[in-house]
């Protein structure tokens, strides 16, 4: 399953719809609290916004790496820079994309990550 975490509804919805076209099971949430509550062993990939109203995405990344070490996390943000991207990848993020991003590029990243998680 793919967990899409972003406080912007249209981003969640459009990503969810595109990933479902690839045959993926997708759950969309809009906050860090919802992400923490929804992350479980069925989630293989998390698409995680860096800036959430109630959480820092890098803090969530660290939490998710500790609690679910097999989960692949792809970070997205409108506010990032190269240092933040480097930090996220060093912390274990599978990828880092800046908004506005190419939906097809993100889709390819998620599909590849999901395939790797399953094997």
Image (tube, rainbow, N blue to C red):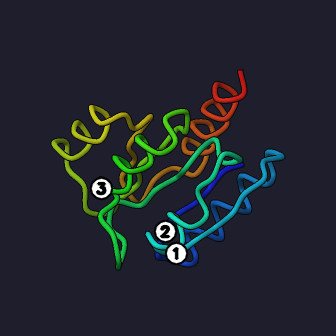
Query: Dot 2 surroundings within 10 Å: few (below 14), some, or many (20 or more)?
Result: many
**Cα distance in 3D space between marks 3 and 1:** 16 Å
Secondary element under disc 2, as helix, strand or loop, is: loop
Secondary element under disc 1, as helix, strand or loop, is: loop
Question: In the image, is 38 to the left or to the right of 33?
Answer: right
Pointer 2 and pointer 3: residues touching (CB < 8 Å)? no
Return the residue at label 1: 30
Residue drawn 61% across the image and 40% down it: 110
Q: Quadrant of the C terminus?
A: top right
Residue drawn 39% across the image and 59% down it: 99
Residue drawn 35% across the image and 77% down it: 54
Return the residue at label 3: 59
**Cα distance in 3D space between marks 2 and 1:** 5 Å
Residue 67 placed where, x, y %? 47, 45
The mark nearer the N terminus, 3 or 1, is: 1
Residue drawn 49% across the image and 76% down it: 8
Foreground pick, 88 / 100: 88
Q: Nearer the viewer, mark 3 or mark 1?
A: 3
Pointer 3 and pointer 1: residues touching (CB < 8 Å)? no
Query: Dot 1 surroundings within 10 Å: few (below 14), some, or many (20 or more)?
Result: some
Is 33 drawn above or below residue 61 in the view shown? below
Return the residue at label 2: 6
Residue 102 placed where, x, y %? 51, 50
Is 95 drawn above or below residue 40 in the view shown? above
The mark nearer the N terminus, 2 or 3, is: 2
Considering every residue shown, the one lying at the far top of the view is 119
Residue 48 placed where, x, y %? 46, 56
Which labelled disc corresponds to residue 48? none
Pointer 2 and pointer 1: residues touching (CB < 8 Å)? yes
Secondary element under disc 3, as helix, strand or loop, is: helix
């Amino acid at each position: 399953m793919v967990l899409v975490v972003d406080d912007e509804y249209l981003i969640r919805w459009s990503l969810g719809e595109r990933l479902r076209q690839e045959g993926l099971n997708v759950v969309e949430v809009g906050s860090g609290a919802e992400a923490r509550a929804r992350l479980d062993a069925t989630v293989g990939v998390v698409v995680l916004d860096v800036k959430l109203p109630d959480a820092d995405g890098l803090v969530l990344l660290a939490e998710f790496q500790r609690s679910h070490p097999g989960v692949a996390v792809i970070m997205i943000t409108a506010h990032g820079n190269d240092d933040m991207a480097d930090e996220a990848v060093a912390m274990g993020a599978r990828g880092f994309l800046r908004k506005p991003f190419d939906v097809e590029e993100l889709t390819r990243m998620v599909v590849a990550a999901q395939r790797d998680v399953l094997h």
